[in-house]
Amino acid sequence: DTEVTQTPKHLVMGMTNKKSLKCEQHMGHRAMYWYKQKAKKPPELMFVYSYEKLSINESVPSRFSPECPNSSLLNLHLHALQPEDSALYLCASSQVGGGKGQPQHFGDGTRLSIL
Amino acid sequence: DAKTTQPTSMDCAEGRAANLPCNHSTISGNEYVYWYRQIHSQGPQYIIHGLKNNETNEMASLIITEDRKSSTLILPHATLRDTAVYYCIVLGVGGSNYKLTFGKGTLLTVNP
């Protein structure tokens, strides 16, 4: 079991649908992340939120829209996705900086399939 | 952040120590060495990290060479459940603190 909870675990959607992925943590972490992982590839960073503000966007297409409504929740809104967006979407959280090296803690992801 | 080099795959017998090497010859003074693993169908799991000194926790030990150009993750008594892809990542603190860049990692297979 992980301390970062992602829902749903699986999602199948059509290219015209709108859906959202949800991530929740209660460890008091103020940095939250979205990663994308294609099959047999390592995870790739998409977005970073620090203190509920977007701090890094790794040139992600606008059909992916992140949202951090509070310090415990992170959403990823999906619209007009393409089949190549099918992947495992991972959420992570960590303490913010501090100069001591703060590890990130991951959820088990949402496996997304685009029809 | 410095690049890392890891073997593509390794095998280990159950109950024996698993020693996973990582080269990071371009590491700079303020960069940490992190180890994560990913078991099939799960998210990455943080294992351990260190700056200069060797580190040990309930999961593993991290040995960093004196020149910091390489490190070894040691799982003292490997079990079948340790079969996973192990990622060695070098990460600087400060402005780039948040950007974990995963390489291809090492697939460790623990055999009965």
Image (cartoon, rainbow, N blue to C red):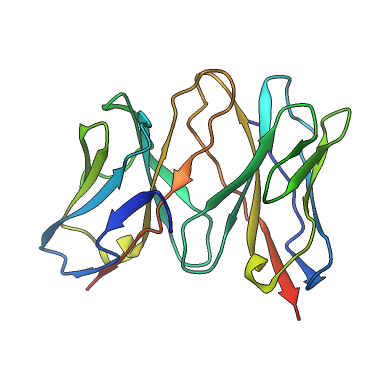
Q: Is residue B82 visible?
A: yes
Which of the two residues, A95 or A42, is positioned nearer the viewer here? Answer: A95
- Asked whether residue B34 is in view, the answer is no
Which is more toward the observer, B57 or B109?
B57
Q: Quadrant of the N terminus of chain A?
A: bottom left
Classify residue A78 as left or right of residue B74: left
- State how many labels appear: 0
Closer to us: B91 or B37: B37
Q: Position of residue A2 (x, y in %)?
A: 43, 54
Q: In the displayed structure, would residue A110 be above or below residue B53?
A: below
Residue B52 coordinates in the image, percent (x, y): 78, 26
Report the residue at 24% width, 62% height from top: A8
Residue furthest bottom as drawn: B112
> In the image, residue B107 lies at what x, y percent?
68, 65
**Residue at left 83%, top 61%?**
B17
B65 versus B73 height, above or below = above
Question: Relative to residue B67, is residue A91 depicted above or below?
Answer: below
Locate the C terminus of chain A by quadrant: bottom left
Residue B16 % position (x, y)? 84, 67
Q: Is residue B53 left or right of residue A43?
A: right
Q: Is residue B77 above or below residue B4?
A: below
List the single residue furthest toward the right: B66
In the drawing, does residue A92 fall left or right of residue B33? Answer: left
